[in-house]
Image (cartoon, rainbow, N blue to C red):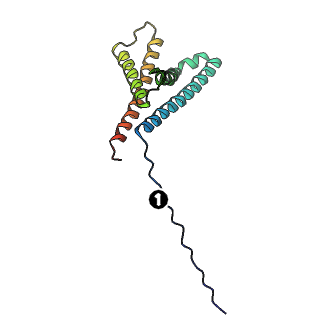
Amino acid sequence: MRKRTLRTVPAPVEAPQPKIVKTPEVRADDQLKNLIYSASCDSQYARRQCDDWAARFATNPASAFEWSSGVFKQAARHQVAEYVIAFVKQVARDDDEYAARSSRKVLEILAQELRSEVMRNAKYPESSTSPTSNHMSLCLMSARAETLEKVENAIARLDQLETLPG
């Protein structure tokens, strides 16, 4: 009787996968999409927080006002997030009726717009006789500054990726 030996079959060798290199335009598109997604999430979350406060207000207005500082911040974040989404859509198509602006350019224009708003509010703070109006103005400036930081970080990431060796 012959002894059977098992033959081992070599594992198939996979061809090396080509390295996918994103162009600067694709990277900028990704950064802009991420920014819009983040703004959309911020808007939805802030809206839910405002709705929760409105429900508390409906049951106990005095208590809701005592703890209303957070709703000012959320309302400001909601407004700025909605502004960013609308601004990006508008700026992306304003360049030319036959060509769209690059995502990088849209990010730069948005950063410039937010920076000028933050600087204007910092130089000329709201000085209404209404403390509520002044507080909302500060919350809006803070929300704009947070968003500006996100936009500037996105631009800095693009700059950093462009300087990396291919």
Q: Which quarter of the rendering shows the N terminus?
A: bottom right
Residue 30 locus on image (x, y percent): 47, 37
| Image-based side of 110 in relation to 7, left or right | left
Q: Residue at x 57, y 22 (%)?
A: 50
* Of residues 57 and 121, the one drawn nearer to the viewer in this rendering: 121
Question: Please, is residue 139 above or below residue 24 in the view?
Answer: above
Residue located 45% across and 48% down the image:
20
Q: Looking at the picture, how far across and down is residue 109, in whole percent? A: 40, 24
* Residue 12 vertical placement versus 70 (above, below): below
Give the residue at x 37% y 19%.
116
Instruction: Using a 10 Å C-alpha cutoff, classify the residue at mark 1 as few (fewer than 14 neighbours), some (14 to 19) or many (20 or more).
Output: few
The residue shown at (38%, 20%) is 118
Relative horizontal placement of residue 150, taking residue 38 as reference (left or right): left
Q: Nearer the viewer, residue 56 or 22?
A: 22
> Among all residues in the image, which is located at the extreme right?
1
Q: Give residue 27's position: percent from left, percent from top.
A: 43, 38
Q: Residue furthest front?
A: 98
- Kindly give the residue lying farthest to the top in the view shown: 129
Viewer-closest of 39 and 30: 30
Above or below, 55 against 7 in this view is: above
Residue type at mark 1: give it.
Pro
Nearest the eye: 21 or 56: 21
Where disc 1 sits, the SS reads: loop
Q: Quadrant of residue 152?
A: top left
The residue labelled by disc 1 is: 16
